[in-house]
Amino acid sequence: MSVYNTGFPDRFYIIADSTRALSFFRFLYADMGITPGKQYIIDAVPEKHRERIKALFVQYYPSAAIAFVDESFDIEADIGQCAANRRPLVLASGCEQQLASKLDAAFVEIAFPVSNRLVLAGYNGGLTLLEDVASSILDYAGLD
């Protein structure tokens, strides 16, 4: 993970439900040291709970940017603008694989529907995620 070149993503963007997004956000930032970009919460979170959820993200990264979205159509332009002149890492469901491809982003499936893996929690799940993220980044950067 210490390989940094022009192909190495410097920000990650999660598109997932609030619980999954927070868990992956914490792991990627606090444990792996990857800088977060904007995070996209796609489940229908009632307005009265949104500030509390944002506070949980801010607890780990004070300048965390969180967006609650009902439709994923606007995410592509938003990530494209946030990731201008940077190579993004997108973690989302299999439905967003085409979006990641359009953004020329490294991509890891983490949310339902997942087409080719079982996503587990805990120590083994964290190691598997680390392996998946590293493999995606290395494949993307052409360093495999």
Image (spheres, helix red, strand yellow):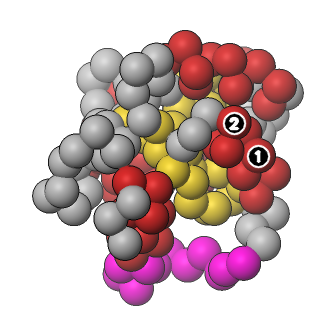
The one of 101 and 114 positioned closer to us in this rendering: 101
Residue 21 within the magenta-colored segment of the rendering: no
Q: Position of residue 59 (x, y in %)?
A: 30, 33
Q: Is residue 44 left or right of residue 102?
A: right
When asked about the image quadrant of residue 46, the answer is top right
Q: Position of residue 135 (x, y in %)?
A: 42, 70
Q: Which mark is residue 98?
A: 1
Q: Can residue 139 be seen at all in this image of the molecule? A: yes
Residue 120 within the magenta-colored segment of the rendering: yes
SS category of the residue bearing label 2: helix
Q: Which mark is residue 141?
A: none
Question: Magenta part of the protein: which range?
Answer: 116-129
- Residue type highlighted by circle 2: Lys
Callout 1: 10 Å neighbours few (<14), some, many (20+)? few
Give the residue drawn at x 28%, y 39%.
6
Q: Is residue 124 above or below residue 71?
A: below
Give the residue drawn at x 45%, y 64%.
139
Q: Is residue 119 left or right of residue 93?
A: left
Q: Which mark is residue 102?
A: 2
Gap between marks 1 and 2, in whole Å? 6 Å
Q: Position of residue 144 (x, y in %)?
A: 37, 72
- Residue type highlighted by circle 1: Gln
Q: Position of residue 19 (x, y in %)?
A: 59, 50
